Image (spheres, rainbow, N blue to C red):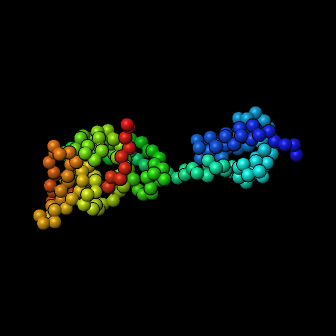
């Protein structure tokens, strides 16, 4: 077998990595051949040779490189379901705007939804008007958790505390110019765990 062109090897490797990063799968020999301007048979021979010299791992279908091995493509499809007030409670109908992928390497695994923050009652914890707040679905909370709370068919985003002595729930705005919301009970719709914002 004739020696392989090292520049063509690099070109094949680079294309395979870019394709994987965009699509989550390895390109076919046909796609590589179209990209680098050689026949499918030549691509296959190059892939085998590159596998033998340790440049890539190739099993006849999947191509792995140092770059693709580090990519975690696992994600969860998460709904953006409108806005949640960061002020006084407002009625909010669940309205799915779109679905987006949340990479599990950053957000972890779980059942999530995303709300758009509205208002300025949570600015002291870095949640500003228009921010996307990732909410983990659960119906319980610990003191200090930032929750989506449903109170009298209205929801709001606040820090949750129990006043055991007076048997009340305190929904605390993280803005010193605003007063606590004190209720007998509320329904926890989820816990805020991440904020996605533009800088």
Name of the residue lying farthest toward the left: 166
User: Which is nearer the eye, 177 or 187?
Assistant: 177
**Where residue 131 appears, x then y in whole percent?**
33, 41
**Where residue 101 appears, x then y in whole percent?**
47, 47
Q: Is residue 82 left or right of residue 24?
A: left
Q: Is residue 2 left or right of residue 7?
A: right
Would you say residue 92 is visible in this rendering?
no
Would you say residue 125 is visible in this rendering?
yes
User: Residue at image x 55%, y 50%?
Assistant: 73
Name of the residue lying farthest toward the top: 37
How many labels sit on residues?
Answer: 0
User: Which is nearer the eye, 137 or 121?
Assistant: 121
**Where residue 185 appears, x then y in whole percent?**
18, 60
User: Residue at image x 28%, y 53%?
Assistant: 146
**Quadrant for the C terminus in the image:** top left
Rendered view: 188 above or below 128: below
User: Residue at image x 69%, y 42%?
Assistant: 13
Name of the residue lying farthest toward the bottom: 165
Q: Is residue 6 left or right of residue 126?
A: right
**Where residue 38 appears, x then y in whole percent?**
78, 35
The answer to which quarter of the image holds residue 121 is top left
User: Residue at image x 73%, y 54%?
Assistant: 59
């Amino acid at each position: 077998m004739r020696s392989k062109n090292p520049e063509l090897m690099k070109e094949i490797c680079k294309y395979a990595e870019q394709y994987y990063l965009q699509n989550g799968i390895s390109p076919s020999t046909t796609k590589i051949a179209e990209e680098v301007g050689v026949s499918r048979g030549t691509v296959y021979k190059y892939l085998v040779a590159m596998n033998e010299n340790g440049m890539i791992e190739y099993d006849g279908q999947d191509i792995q490189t140092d770059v693709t091995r580090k990519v975690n493509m696992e994600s969860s499809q998460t709904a953006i379901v409108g806005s949640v007030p960061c002020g006084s409670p407002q009625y909010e109908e669940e309205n799915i705007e779109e679905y987006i992928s949340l990479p599990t390497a950053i957000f972890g695994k779980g059942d999530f939804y995303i709300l758009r923050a509205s208002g300025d009652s949570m600015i002291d914890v870095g949640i500003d008007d228009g921010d996307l707040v990732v909410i983990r679905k659960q119906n319980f909370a610990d003191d200090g958790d930032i929750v989506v709370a449903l109170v009298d068919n209205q929801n709001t985003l606040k820090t949750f505390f129990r006043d055991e002595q007076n048997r009340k729930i305190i929904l605390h705005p993280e803005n010193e110019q605003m007063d606590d919301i004190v209720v007998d009970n509320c329904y926890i719709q989820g816990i805020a765990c991440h904020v996605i914002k533009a800088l």
